[in-house]
Amino acid sequence: MSKNSQKTLVYIVEDSVSSGALYSSQLESIGYETRHFVDGYSALAAIKEKMPSVIIQDVCLPDISGLDVLQFVKRQKSPARVIIITSNSSIEVAVDAMRLGGFDFIEKPFTRERMVTSVYDAIKQINLETEPPAVEDEVSDQPDTSFLGESLAMKTVFRLLDSAARSKASVFVTGESGTGKEVCAQYLHNTSARKNGPVIAINCAAIPKDLFESEFFGHMKGSFSGALADRKGAVEVANGGTLFLDEICEMDLNLQSKLLRFLQTGTFSRVGSSDVIQSDVRVVCATNRNPAAEVGEGRFREDLYYRLNVIPVQLPALRDRGPDILLLANAILLDKNEANDKGFQQFSSDVQTLFMKYDWPGNIRELQNVIENMVVINTGTEITIDMLPESFGQTNLQVTTTPSVIKTDTKASTSVSPTSIQEIVPMWIVEKNTIEKAIEVCDGNIPLAAAHLGVSASTIYRKMKNWD
């Protein structure tokens, strides 16, 4: 590290003379050039004169807030990377600082390794943005077909993620099941300075409570029954990359405290060992619950919530994304075509209309499954209504009201008995009248009408095609 950091200037803004001197000596010992300031105004004057590469910034200063210094730095043409240092009592302020553009924040007291790692990551981020991208990066940065969007909601998400990628701040992704939370984490990783490192995903809901700590931090041989060999945990394997924690609200409270300590110190120990191991990871977590409500119910630690919820990202439901539905559908169709060696080129207008009206309770995951089913089972160049799976529409939102108009009409139609052969109405006409009346009552929403009638939407579309 020292060879690459000999000319790197680091400002330390810390009101404690002894602490500032310690930080300076630790960084200078590995080749960094440092300057120490004990108040905010002195730091501002120095920043105007010369912008450093990195600033280690205390939040609480005797004259002005460390946030004022941060905001001043971010307004400059080539701003430094600002690492926030804070005491436990001001952690909420530090979270606000990260949202204002801080690169990382470290809670006092911290180790030399924790500070050095953060400075090194900041320099690496600067180099990534100033150096031209390598040729091999052109392929790796292609977006996933399920993480596209031109709607206002998704543009907001992309802006948040692009800002987050330039820092080390934790990101908390929320949204309904199937909205693409893991793909979101992958996108964030691919656009950050950590893109050449690993992405390790843990589903907190799928790991037994007794094995959680072992999966997370690893274990030593013989530390428990079944531990036949030393094993690295996810935190250690993800070193230098991104750790994605899905369904974070399912994590046991005891492990939450250990995760919090790791986030604070950057260190951990394997199960059955007292050796302290350092790991530098960027944490992205996700849940389909309301994390604030989980904190209120006592199922999730408030201090951990603040530590993780530095940059909150809310993924919109597919039904709220308008034209993105067809954009995603076409991208998925191309992907499934290639995977299954098929030649479908487009969706029929009827299918497009149905996709836009359907509320997609399973979100992007349901859209992928429906399209894959049609591509695998059928052949041709156009996806048509009759190719829809029989189950389509049966997972629609649960009916909560009774369609009394439909029931009354049905009862009336069945109670009228023909008195002559001429009065007998063909069954298909009776069925047609019932379906059309149901669609009318449901304001043209065919999937909803299908749910009330107890059939799939694809069945109704096939019958309508036969009537024509």
Image (cartoon, rainbow, N blue to C red):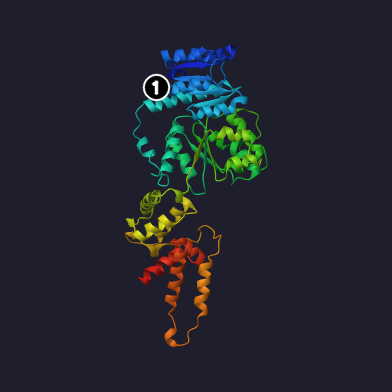
Label count reads 1
Please say if 306 is above or below 106: below
The image shows residue 442 at horizontal and vertical percentages of: 47, 62
Task: State the residue lying farthest toward the bottom.
Answer: 420
The front one of 10 and 385 is: 385
Residue 152 seen in this snapshot:
yes
**Quarter of the image that includes the C terminus:** bottom left
- The image quarter in which residue 187 lies: top left
**Looking at the image, which residue is at 43% across and 79% down?**
426
Instruction: Name the residue: 41% across, 55% down.
Output: 356
438 sits to left or right of 383: right
Give the percent coordinates (x, y) of residue 371.
Answer: 41, 56
Type of amino acid under label 1: Ser
Q: Position of residue 278 (x, y in %)?
A: 57, 28
| Towards the viewer: 371 or 421 | 421
Residue 138 image-quadrant placement = top left
Q: Helix, strand, or loop for circle 1? A: loop
Pointer 1: what residue? 78
One can see residue 392 in this view? no
**In the displayed structure, would residue 7 be above or below residue 374?**
above
| Percent coordinates x, y for residue 323 in the rendering | 38, 49
The residue shown at (59%, 40%) is 292
- Taking the image as shown, residue 174 lies to the left or right of residue 228, namely left
